[in-house]
Amino acid sequence: MRERGLRTGVYKPIQSGNQVDDPAGDAARLAELSGVDDALRVICPVALAEPIAPVLALERAELSLRLDDVKAGFHRLRERYDHVLVEGAGGLAVPYVMDGLVADAVKLLGLPLIIVARAGLGTVNHTLLTVEYARQRGITICGIILCRSTPYIDTAQSYVDLIEASNPRLIARHTDAPILGCVPWLGMSPTRANIVRAIEQYVDVDVIVKRLHNRTS
C-alpha cells in the first residue's frame, strides 16, 4: 500500500513474547517492513516478554489494557495516516485484553478483516471456522491470504504441493470471501525487498486498495 503511495501506518496494540525494542518482535518487524518512522512505542503501546496469550501476559505483569485503550492508540495513528494496518494476535477468538477478544477489538475499530492462514494441511478447517465466526460477530471480511511460513520438513513434497495447490479452491468452494493470494516460503530471514516483491507477485493488493477506497468514498 505504501509502495502505491497510500499514506499507511501500522499498529500492533499488544505484543507478547518480545519487548517493544526487540528486533525479532512484531513491532520492530512492522516498522522495518512498512518503512514508517513512528517510534516503536507508538506502533506497539504494550509489549510483554512472556510468549503467552496477551491477556494472560497482562495479568502476570499486573497490567490492565482495555478495548478503549486499543481504540485510543489506533486513533492516534489515524491522525497521521489515511489508513492503518492493524495486526492482531493469533486469531479472532484469542483472549486479548481485559474486556475482550481479538474479535471484539476488530469490531470496535470497524476495520475490514484480512485473514492470514497457513497454506498447508488443516487450513481449510481453520479458515472456514474463522470466516464463519467473523460473520457471526458482524465483522466484514476483505479477503484471505494463505502463507507458507515453514520450509518442507519431509520427503513427501508431492503431497505438500497437492494440498497447498488445492486449499485455495476448497476454501473458495465453501466461502465467498476473496482469496487474495498464496505466498510461498521466503526463507528464514527474508529482506524487506524480498517481502515487498513477493506480496506484489503473489497477493492481489489492488483488491485491498479498492476496498479501502470504497470505504472512504
Image: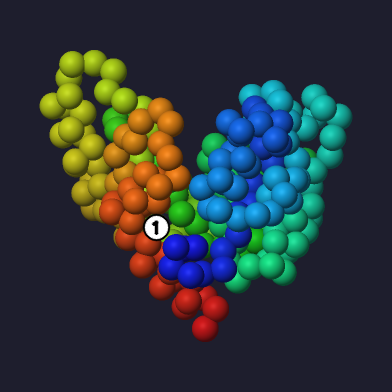
Q: Which residue is mark 1?
A: 143
Count the numbered circles shown.
Answer: 1
Q: In the figure, 5 relative to 100: above or below? A: below
Spot occupied by residue 38 in the image (x, y as percentages of width and height): 69, 54
Q: Is residue 153 left or right of residue 24?
A: left
Q: Residue at x 75, y 62 (%)?
A: 76
Residue at the limit of the structure toward the right, as seen here: 62
Secondary structure at badge 1 equals strand
Residue at the limit of the structure toward the bottom, as seen here: 217
Q: Residue at x 60, y 59 (%)?
A: 9
Residue 155, by quadrant, is top left
Q: Is residue 91 left or right of residue 148?
A: right
Residue at the limit of the structure toward the top, as seen here: 154
| Viewer-proximal residue among 99 and 179 | 179
| Viewer-proximal residue among 131 and 9 | 9
Q: Amino acid at mark 1?
A: Gly
Q: Residue at x 17, y 19 (%)?
A: 156
Residue 16 visible: no
Q: Residue at x 69, y 67 (%)?
A: 80
Q: In the figure, 103 relative to 215: above or below? A: above
Residue 212 visible: yes
Spot occupied by residue 196 in the image (x, y as percentages of width and height): 40, 51
Q: In the figure, 11 relative to 153: above or below? A: below
Spot occupied by residue 157 in the image (x, y as percentages of width and height): 17, 24
Spot occupied by residue 110 in the image (x, y as percentages of width and height): 61, 64
| Viewer-proximal residue among 35 and 112 | 35
